[in-house]
Structures are given as structure tokens and as C-alpha cells.
Image (cartoon, coloured by chain):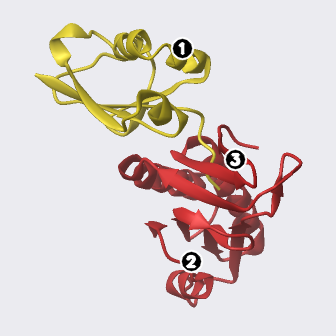
Chain colours: A yellow, B red
Amino acid sequence: MSIRILFFASLADITGTRETEVDSALFPDVSSVFERFVTEFPALAAHRSSLMCAVNQEFASPDAPVRDGDEIAFFPPVSGG
Amino acid sequence: MYRLVRDPIDIQALTEALARPEDGAVAVFEGRVRNHARGKQVRHLEYYAYESMAIKMLEEVGARAKKNYAIRDIGIVHRLGRLNHGECSVAIVVASAHRGPAFEACRFAIDTLKKIVPIWKKEFYADGEVWIEGGN
């Protein structure tokens, strides 16, 4: 029962990984997943206010529910173009 | 046509692939790498993407452009990886019967891309490198 977690740009630099997994049973929503990583990597807290989240490649709010098999991505504001 | 590429973007080929005889206007926006930013000389840039979502969001930008403007078709290509000064980072081609909607949709598409497509640039200077976060 796992959720795939992705980090991009400066967030991946902080966590030292672009991809990991967590147990889906432990996390009711997107925000709770992020806070679990803030505990492990306190520097993530500075990104909380500007954080962008996606569930299964669609933008999602922090209170969006998470389900087994989901792909959750955390990233800073985008800067393409 | 929505693509992420690692090789130089061929705008002429993109334009020819998109345009049809019924199009009286083809508007092209080409985003290029500047040699300066935030008061510093930029040596080069690197673009990274959340690729599976970026393709979906490029499609979303195109769908919104088609919904909001009287255009026939739109194509968006964004380059990833290392780019030097003057190289094209993004190309948007809009084909329509008339020029007004083509210009407007082109502007809309680049502005929207900069807000919702998960691509990030890193600027490299003589004395370091910085992730750029947020549009301009």
C-alpha cells in the first residue's frame, strides 16, 4: 500500500532525491505527506507557503485526499518559458 | 502538437507542420535564452520538467487557447536540458483564419505556460547557480 512521491527543482535538492515512496495508510491527505518530509528535512518548511502540489499529474490542493497507488508531486512555482 | 525536446527546436518545421491552406495567419512566439538576468551575466541555463505532467499541461494550455480564441490550431514545443545564449527555449505556433486571434492566443499561451506547466530553469553564473522559482 504505497504512494509514489516526487520532488522537483530546489525541493529535490533539499531531500536529496527526486522519487521515494510512503505507506498510503499513514497519510489522509497531501498536506500530511508533505509535513512528514518537513520533519525529516526541516529546510522544506521555507517552501510551504509557495508549495505547488499535484496528484496523478493534476494540480491538487493540500487538503486533497490521497489513495493507494497515487503519484504525488511537490514542487516550487514553475519557471519555464 | 505538444512536445518536450532535448535538441534544438526547428521553428520552420513546426510552422510548416501546423499551417494549412485555410490559415490566413500564423503567429509564432519564440522564447530565447538571455545573456543576463537579475543584474548578472548568465553563462547558460538548464531546464528540467516533471515530464508526464508537463505534457498534460501543455495540452491544457492549448485547449484553453482554442476555447478562448477563434484559432484553428496551436503547437507548443519546450526544450529541456542545457541551453546557451540565443537558443530557443520555447516555441508557440498559432494558426488561424485571421491575425487578431492568432496574436492574442499566442500571448495567452506563453503567459499561461509560465504559470501552470511544471518546468523549472536553473541559471548558471561565473560564481554559482540558482534555481529560478516563479514566473516573470
Q: Residues within 10 Å of mark 3 (few under 14, many from 20)?
A: few
Residue pushed farthest right?
B39
Write down the chain letter for disc 1. A
Depth-wise, is mark 3 or mark 1 nearer the camera?
3
Q: Position of residue A64 (x, y in %)?
A: 37, 17
Q: Which residue is mark 2?
A: B9
Q: Where residue B54 sits in the image (x, y, percent)?
A: 45, 51
- Out of B20 and B58, give the one closest to the viewer: B58
Q: Residue at x 63, y 71 (%)?
A: B94
- Describe the element under mark 3 as helix, strand or loop: strand
Pointer 3: what residue? B128
**Where residue A45 is drawn, which disc sits there?**
1
Q: Quadrant of residue A41?
A: top left
Mark nearer the viewer, 1 or 2: 1
Q: Give the total number of marks visible in the rendering.
A: 3
* Disc 3/disc 1 C-alpha distance (Å): 24 Å
Q: Amino acid at mark 1?
A: Ala
